[in-house]
Image: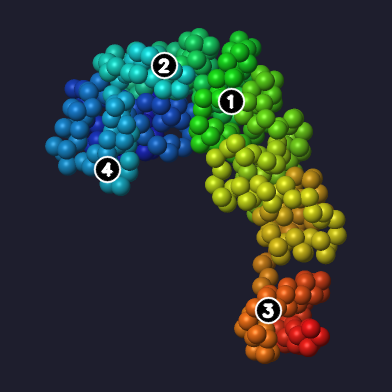
Amino acid sequence: MTRLTLPDPLNKPQTQRLLTVLGAPAVDVRFVGGSVRNAVLDRPIADVDIGTPDIPTRVLERLEAAGVKAVPTGIDHGTITAIVDGTPFEITTLRRDTACDGRHAAVEFTTDWQEDARRRDFTMNAMSLRSDGTLFDDFNGVDDAKAGRVRFVGDAGDRIQEDYLRILRLFRFFAQYGRAPIDSATLDACRTHAAGMARLSAERVQQELSKLLAAADPLPAVNAMFAADVMRHVLPAARDSQTLASLLKIEPSTPAFPPHWIRRLAALVSVADHLKLSNADRERLKRIGDQTPITTAKELHRALYRWGAPIVVDRLLLSNTTAFLKEAAAWTDKTLPVGGADVLALGIAPGPRVGELLASVETWWIDADFKPARDEVLEHLKALAQKK
């Protein structure tokens, strides 16, 4: 048992007030999960999760008595979200699993902190911390976290079969926190049970994959997924990581367009229909995979006008084309200086011909490298209208 100085936001007044509302120090309330892991690693803390031996109804009673807004976000599994000064805190009653189906667990509440720690996925996530700085570490989580060693609590195969999402979480945490290689027994367990990931929802796979690919350097984790024969269950069309490796080397050359997980996904596979992507992400992935060449300045300008700088930079980075990167990054969007009203003003009746004339004048304007000003574009539009 060691002592830790509480970092922000664990030592903020609203946080400490909530612990008091939950009965601390008489009730053994502790910080758990990612906030403790990141406190140990001196990393920023985003969300604060709290564990308590009190059952959910008692937690609700305490919060309501203190006038703290409470939302029963997962009360069947013991989780309540408290809102203090606009900040959400997830409070969960200590639990032990009684049955698992490979994705969800039936739980019973407990007052035993070790039982609760035993059901967590990785040793670095199984620590808990009191408000006085007392750190509890039953599974060597401190040493593992500081060594960058992502290790299951207990037997890897057993933990994976309880929840197959843990395979993806293993590689995601390795991408975010790992430095020491994943041990061979754990990789073997992932290989053995990888088919179980078919039970996972597309949304959960997308969430884990997006976080993995957004890591500073996802390549070691991606390579480990290939080595453990996991990648084909996640991205069946992915064949190797060579394009991703090249992309990661060149990405720092475009600081105005920071790394994006969709760009990195495109480096692995251009089509991912089985993932639950947003419409914007799906459209971005589709455009990145477009095969229209960009080998000349004119092709570059046309692409920038049609797709915008972010997509073009993605394509240039993925094709390892550095010649146009600086110009693409400095691009400012262009707008055709005429519109439908200008066509109608020439006496053209509403209908398909309006669009045809606009498309023709736009093509001419693009080919002229966007240099003609409005007056010149109007003259060209008038000439086109007279010809047809």
Identify the amino acid type marked 2. Answer: Cys
- Residue position for label 1: 171
Label 1 with label 3: CB-CB less than 8 Å: no
Q: Secondary structure at mark 4?
A: strand
Tell me the CA gap for discs 4 and 1.
Answer: 34 Å
- Residue position for label 4: 84
> 80 or 332: which is nearer to us?
80
Crowding at mark 1 (Cα within 10 Å: few <14, some 14-19, many 20+)? many
Q: Is residue 55 above or below residue 61?
A: above
Q: Nearer the viewer, mark 2 or mark 3?
A: 3
Tell me the CA gap for discs 1 and 2.
Answer: 22 Å
> 379 or 254: which is nearer to us?
379
Name the residue at 63% across, 81% down. Answer: 350
Question: Which of the two labelled residues, at mark 1 and mark 2, occupies the earlier sequence position?
Answer: 2
Q: Nearer the viewer, mark 3 or mark 4?
A: 3
Q: Nearer the viewer, mark 4 or mark 2?
A: 2
Identify the amino acid type marked 4. Answer: Val
- Residue position for label 3: 354
Identify the amino acid type marked 1. Answer: Phe
